[in-house]
Image (tube, helix red, strand yellow):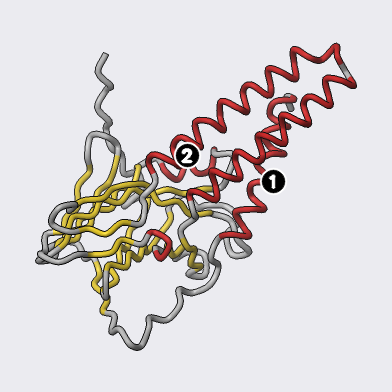
């Protein structure tokens, strides 16, 4: 095992502890009795429900009502990517459209993902700001630790600085992604009718050890007094393959 790999493993272990502490491991709380909540479920070939395999490598599930629409985009390779990430994180992209005359609250912190094949374990969305802050704190701690190591072993300066630079680059990219591409809490109205961004979930718990070759999920998105459920499998069928378009040169 290389020194750089060992370092990344150690740092990912620290962040995993934070993720486990901040994620939601129970069934979503019951809705407020003062506000009736109805649940609508995406169903293939039903009115208002769409599905597409697109050449950017994503499956898209759309749910459209009279005054709003929600599009869930899932990377066809997301399971493989989640397995390779230093942190056990699974991501989906949501785009929300409001077509009414009033307003609609989008609250990412109340979005839940159910892992159907893992005893229906339900995880709440991770807070992107908490993740970004922890990434920065871990990197700052690594800088101090590297400086101590160099003082003790000056002959290893080049190796240690190279490891630190690689980690700082990884952290900076992750922090930039979390700050600029995460779905944020927002109020949609006729003047601001659309919001889009990524929602992240941890993939480890006492019920989840490893992700299976094919997984089944239910994503629950609250919008006002409604909850929209998206049941989906990844891949949708065994051996399903999307041919991605080549990036333009």
Question: Which of 101 and 210 lies nearest the eye of the viewer?
Answer: 101
What is the number of the mark on residue 14? 1
Q: Residue at x 11, y 64 (%)?
A: 100
**Residue 179 image-quadrant placement:** top left
Q: Residues within 10 Å of mark 2 (few under 14, many from 20)?
A: some
Relative to 205, residue 135 above or below:
above
Residue 32 x, y percent position in the rendering: 37, 83
Please provide percent x and percent y for residue 63: 19, 60
For the point 35% across and 66% down, the residue is 220
The percent coordinates of residue 34 (x first, y second) are 33, 87
Q: Dot 1: few (<14), some (14–19), or many (≥20) neighbours within 10 Å? A: some
Mark sitting earlier along the chain (1/2): 1
Q: Secondary structure at mark 1?
A: helix
- Residue at coordinates 50% horizontally, 49% vertically from top-left? 129
To which residue does mark 2 refer? 81
Q: Quadrant of residue 106?
A: bottom left
* Between 197 and 249, the one nearer to me in the picture: 197
In the rendered image, the quadrant that contains the N terminus is: top right
């Amino acid at each position: 095992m290389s020194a750089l790999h060992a370092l990344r493993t150690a740092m990912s272990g620290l962040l995993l502890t934070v993720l486990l502490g901040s994620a939601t491991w129970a069934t979503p709380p019951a809705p407020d009795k003062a506000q009736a909540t109805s649940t609508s479920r995406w169903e293939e070939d039903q009115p208002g429900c769409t599905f597409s395999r697109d050449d950017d490598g994503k499956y898209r599930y759309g749910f459209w009502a009279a005054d709003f629409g929600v599009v869930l985009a899932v990377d066809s390779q997301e399971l493989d990517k989640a397995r390779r990430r230093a942190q056990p994180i699974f991501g989906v992209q949501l785009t929300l459209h409001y077509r009414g005359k009033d307003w609609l609250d989008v609250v990412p912190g109340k979005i839940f993902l159910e892992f159907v094949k893992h005893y229906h374990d339900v995880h709440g969305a991770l807070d992107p700001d908490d993740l970004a802050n922890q990434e920065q704190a871990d990197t700052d701690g690594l800088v101090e630790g590297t400086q101590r190591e160099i003082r003790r072993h000056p002959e290893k300066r080049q190796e240690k600085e190279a490891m630190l630079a690689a980690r700082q680059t990884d952290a900076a990219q992750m922090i930039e992604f979390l700050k600029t591409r995460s779905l944020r809490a927002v109020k949609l109205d006729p003047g601001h009718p659309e919001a889009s961004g990524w929602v992240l979930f941890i993939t480890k718990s006492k019920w989840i050890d490893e992700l299976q070759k094919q997984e089944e999920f239910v994503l629950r998105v609250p919008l006002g007094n409604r909850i929209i459920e998206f049941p989906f499998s990844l891949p949708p069928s065994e051996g399903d393959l999307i041919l991605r378009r080549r990036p333009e040169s």
